[in-house]
C-alpha cells in the first residue's frame, strides 16, 4: 500500500479513531457510517477529510470460531445491509468483506472498514464473501453453509445469475492476486477442494437465481 492510500487507527477502550491520507477513502467510510445502519458501529464524530471516530465493537472476526458462525443470521444481516440502499438493482457494497471485517458480538454481526465501499450490484459483494468460505471449508460443510446462506439471503434480495457468474470470475482473479501479493496462504483446504467449492459457486445460478 502506498503512502497516499494508507490509514492508521487509534484504538481506545470504547471507540476507534481512523485517520486517512486519501480523501476518497474518508468519504466512503463517512458515507457508510452516516447511514446509521444497525449492522455498522455508531458514528461518534468526524473531521473532514482527516478522521472518523466510531464505536468500538468488542467482537471477534466471525470465522475465528465456527461456534460464532451462523449462515442464516449472516444472510439476513447482509440482505438488510444491501436493502437499506438498494435502488435500480445496485446498493452500497462492503467490498472488503474479509473475515476480519465481519465481527460477531453479543448475538449480532457487525461490518467494519468501508474505505473501499461503493455502489455496485450485490452479486459483487456476495461472490467475494463466499470465496473466503470456499478457501477454508471442507466440501460438505461449504455446501451446507452456501445453501443455507443463499436460501436466507434470497428470501430478501433477488440475484441475477449472469451478473453472479461475471462477478465470480472477476473476484476469483482478484482474490488470488491479493493473497499472492500479501503472501497469504491460499486457504486452509487443498487446491482440489477449493476448486470443487468454486465450481459449486458457479453452479448456484442454475437453481437459485433468476436468469
Image: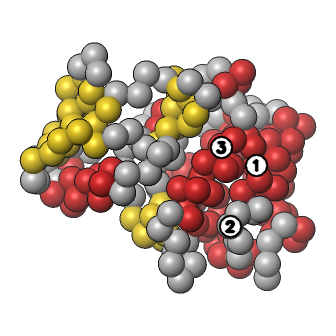
Earlier in the chain: of badge 2 and badge 3, it is: 3
Q: Are marks 1 and 3 in contact (CB under 8 Å)?
A: yes
- Residue drawn at the location 56% of the way across and 24% of the way down: 106
Q: Secondary structure at mark 2?
A: loop
Q: Is residue 133 left or right of residue 92?
A: right
Which mark, residue 157? 2
**67 or 86, which lies in front?**
86
How packed mark 1 is, by other alpha carbons closer than 10 Å (few <14, some 14-19, many 20 or more), is many
Q: Secondary structure at mark 3?
A: helix
Q: Is residue 118 left or right of residue 128?
A: left
Q: Which residue is mark 1?
A: 149
How packed mark 2 is, by other alpha carbons closer than 10 Å (few <14, some 14-19, many 20 or more), is some
Which mark, residue 74? 3
- Residue drawn at the location 69% of the way across and 30% of the way down: 69
**147 or 195, which lies in front?**
147
Q: Position of residue 156 (x, y in %)?
A: 70, 63
**18 or 46, which lies in front?**
46
Label 2 and label 3: CA atoms lie apart by: 14 Å
Q: Are marks 1 and 2 in contact (CB under 8 Å)?
A: no
Q: Position of residue 179 (x, y in %)?
A: 50, 41
Amino acid at each position: 500500500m502506498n503512502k497516499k492510500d494508507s490509514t492508521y487507527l487509534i484504538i481506545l477502550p470504547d471507540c476507534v479513531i481512523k485517520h486517512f491520507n486519501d480523501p476518497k477513502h474518508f468519504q466512503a467510510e463517512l458515507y457508510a457510517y452516516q447511514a446509521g445502519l444497525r449492522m455498522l458501529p455508531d458514528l461518534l464524530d468526524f473531521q473532514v477529510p482527516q478522521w472518523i471516530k466510531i464505536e468500538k465493537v468488542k467482537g471477534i472476526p466471525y470465522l475465528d470460531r465456527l461456534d460464532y458462525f451462523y449462515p442464516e443470521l449472516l444472510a439476513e444481516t447482509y440482505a438488510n445491509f444491501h436493502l437499506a440502499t438498494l435502488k435500480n438493482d445496485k446498493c452500497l457494497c462492503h467490498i472488503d468483506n474479509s473475515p476480519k471485517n465481519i465481527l460477531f458480538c453479543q448475538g449480532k454481526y457487525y461490518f467494519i472498514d468501508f474505505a473501499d465501499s461503493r455502489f455496485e450490484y450485490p452479486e459483487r459483494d456476495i461472490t467475494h464473501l463466499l470465496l473466503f468460505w470456499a478457501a477454508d471449508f471442507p466440501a460438505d460443510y461449504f455446501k451446507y453453509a452456501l445453501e443455507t446462506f443463499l436460501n436466507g439471503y434470497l428470501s430478501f434480495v433477488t440475484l441475477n445469475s449472469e451478473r453472479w457468474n461475471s462477478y465470480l470470475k472477476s473476484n476469483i482473479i482478484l482474490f488470488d492476486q491479493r493473497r499472492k501479493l500479501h503472501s497469504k496462504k491460499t486457504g486452509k483446504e487443498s487446491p482440489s477442494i477449493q476448486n470443487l467449492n468454486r465450481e459449486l459457486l458457479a453452479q448456484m445460478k442454475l437453481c437459485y437465481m433468476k436468469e
